[in-house]
Image (cartoon, rainbow, N blue to C red):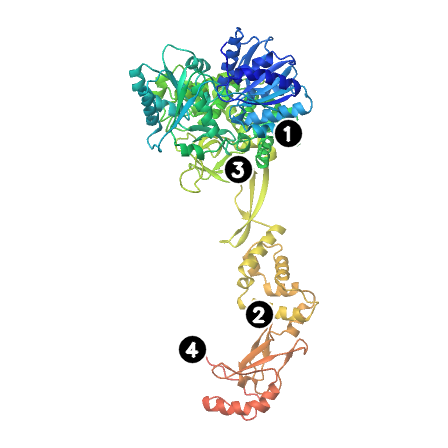
Amino acid sequence: MQPLPIDPALPSIVASLGDAPRLVLDAPPGAGKTTRVPRALLEAPWLAGEVVVLEPRRIAARLAARRVADELGEPVGKRVGYSVRFESAVSAETRVRFVTEGVFTRMLLARPWLHGVGAVVLDEFHERHLQTDVAFALVSHLQRNARPDLRVVVMSATLEVERVAAFLGAPVVRSEGRPFEVEVEHAPKPDERPLASQIASALRELVRRGLDGHVLVFLPGAAEIRKAHEACRPLAEAQGLDLCALHGDLPAAEQDRVLAPGPRRKIILSTNLAESSITVDGVAAVIDSGLARVATHSPWTGFSALRTAPISRASADQRAGRAGRTRRGVCLRLYTAGDYQRRPAFDPPELVRLDLSEPLLELSALGPDPASLDWLDPPPQAALEAARALLTRLGAIDARGKATPLGQRMLRFPLHPRLGRLLCEAEALGVADEGCLAAAVLGEREIRRRERVSFGGGGGARGRAGERGRSDVLARLDDLHDLEGVEGGQLASAGFDPGAVGALRRAAAQLKRLVDRRRAPRPASPEAADEALLRALLAAFPDRVGRRRKPGGREVVLAGGGAAVLAEESVVHDAPFVIVADVAEAGERKGSAPVARLASAVEADWLLELFPEMVRDERELTWNAERERVEEVERLVYDGLVLDETAARPASGEAAAARLAKAALARGLASLVEPPEAFDRWLDRARFVASLDPAFADLGDEGLARLVAGLCERRASFRELREASLLDELTAALGPGARARLDEWAPERLTLPNGRRAPIHYPAGRSPYVESRLQDFFGLKAAPSLAGGRVPLVVHLLAPNQRAVQVTQDLESFWANLYPQVRRELGRRYPRHPWPEDPSRPLPPEPRRPPRP
């Protein structure tokens, strides 16, 4: 067995775990910790049970198990085995089991106390996947409570060692460096060429230097791998190099073939799948693009979405270490040294940036409240609340946050809770197989690259490009039906992504092995099966229901608010109600609505059947400004989305009266009285009396509003208010005797000696006054008073030009002292007007002028 740098540290690791149940291992890339530490634990004298090793990727779990089994001279599945999603190689003899982090959580669901497990090893902890942190918190909780005998090892090549050790209260064991040096070279300046061209240039440079081993090239994803493959093919063929791809869409057998020894040098174009825990013997060089697909949270579906982003310094160091595993190597970074230094030291943990509904459902079944767990980085409270809301909506958890029987059934599937709910409903409706295909369509990458091509002249019943259908998901299922037997280049030439098609097929096949087809009989017809699947889709996306804004239009208004636009290629042209199962990025225009990539028709009756608690009758009163009336509309509403609505009709009742009063006050009551100024005069008089008599009704804004509300009872329109004697009703509403008090204390007009009736003005905050020509007051010895003599009336004496000669409350003094002088001055200016010396006698009334012909 080949010695590895980790070997001298193995006795210390075993001894330390014999003294204390926790350990943090700091070992650089290439040290051999993934394979040698589990084997050392297997032989530890204190071990009582199985060693479970958590790996971040399926391929790492499989390869590590095979490597350890080979070193023991046994086939995988005996003392050393592995369990990954949909695949397992274990037996009753297995003592070391390599698992992915998600599988470990499922193990806890089956064995909450981890009976039969003596040690848990969290490998490559620095990657901080969502399930990594969940597993770490659960194991820590278990060890601190029910299983103090459980050994826990946290190890990585690029780990925040001191922080993790302090959190665990654990000792640190450090291993020596990698067995071979790696020379790291950075790009001298940023390269603006396409990434594939940069890869080809770096490969030519390695060949020029006399490349004598394999080359591992790190690229963000399968699409970039395809382009790099095309760019590097001429050089590879000329140099006799094997070009290989390594990414998650490949079948396990193909991944193993790429990593197996071969007769020729390889150029392995890989995603970050090969970044850690995988040793490729004979790698002499690494070409690092510095990019990776990073999981992000899609707030629309809750599923993880991928975006391309620069890697952290820790990931860059991991990649460089791949070149020094078995020999001296070189790493060519396609980015500058300054760029490297500006990058974050570590990637932020997924726990603080992804959807938490899947781990929260698992925790709800296991028992511990998330708040009771020891988190290295606690999950954001807002994300937890959003996850709880979704799980409650899906029927997966109850009001106490515990998994319901439905939630327990959903956990049978290693899927996002939405897709687990989809499969449970599909089982109950007899379309389990179709549900598996739909879950794969929603959970895997898009299989189309461009316009679809029909095979064999088929064209499914649910619509091809340019045709109409009930569901984009059903259209994808038609694609898969048409693609049966079609592989490789034929898929690509027809506009499909072969890798995505293969991944979708494998996922659907694996899910079909898990569903229960006995729960319900299959629908009697294809049409009934289609409807059953659409109902199952609705069960998975109850919060993504939308109503088409107008018939035939692409914009839909969504339950809970907001809107989306159906993609132009969507086959759902006519359905008034849809669910939007997935969206593409919104357009470049700021504020543009998201584009619905996958939509499916739903019926309003399904919402009533599936979610009766979310459907309610609403009665809404609206003001029709054109008809000047309160109208009533009755609606059937699902989560704020209108399912059905009656035509507007005149309203009645207290609420309608209140709405009419509000509209009348907003418009102004004067507009409802003829002439309009009559209301203002009445209000001024009434407020004047109220200011003097506490028993009189309050006519401030609130008091007036109460009066108007009373007048609007049994009325719903301005027409009804106008037809009523509004001022009379307002006066009567002031209280008993209000009309007499108003007329007595605040008369509307003053009759002058010559018979003219002059209006009295009651301005707010000022004394009441009357104004008229000076001659009209001849014969009036003193100014009258109001309110039973309490308030003297101010008199405005006007000259013939209608300007005030005098404003006074003491008319008697004016006649005696000022009138003679006024008489002389105005008599000269207006000789045609009468200016008698004795103003105590009234002038005769002026004869009325006949109307003009």
Q: Is residue 587 left or right of residue 820?
A: left
Counting from the top left corner in percent of width and height, residue 243 is at: 36, 17
Q: Is residue 248 left or right of residue 187?
A: right
Q: Three-letter amino acid code at disc 4?
A: Arg
Task: Bin the neighbour count of mark 2 within 10 Å (Cα to Cα): few under 14, some 14-19, many 20 and up.
Answer: some
Q: Mark 2 = which residue?
A: 681
Identify the secondary structure beneath mark 4: loop
Identify the secondary structure beneath mark 2: helix
Kindly tell me whether residue 165 is visible in this rendering. yes
Q: Quadrant of residue 460?
A: top left
Q: Three-letter amino acid code at disc 2?
A: Arg
Earlier sequence position, callout 2 versus callout 4: 2
Q: Nearer the viewer, mark 2 or mark 4?
A: 2
Task: Bin the neighbour count of mark 4 within 10 Å (Cα to Cα): few under 14, some 14-19, many 20 and up.
Answer: few
Earlier sequence position, callout 4 versus callout 3: 3
Counting from the top left corner in percent of width and height, residue 688 is at: 63, 71
853 or 735: nearer the eye?
A: 735
Identify the secondary structure beneath mark 1: loop
Q: Three-letter amino acid code at disc 3?
A: Ala
782 or 450: nearer the eye?
A: 450
Q: Mark 1 = which residue?
A: 373
Q: Mark 4 = which residue?
A: 852
Task: Bin the neighbour count of mark 3 within 10 Å (Cα to Cα): few under 14, some 14-19, many 20 and up.
Answer: many
Q: Is residue 724 above or below residue 796?
A: above
Q: How many angstroms separate mark 2 from mark 1 (CA)?
A: 73 Å
Q: Three-letter amino acid code at disc 1?
A: Leu
Q: Nearer the viewer, mark 4 or mark 3?
A: 3
Q: Is residue 264 left or right of residue 654?
A: left
Counting from the top left corner in percent of width and height, residue 131 is at: 56, 25
Residue at horizontal 60 percent and vertical 12 percent from the top:
42
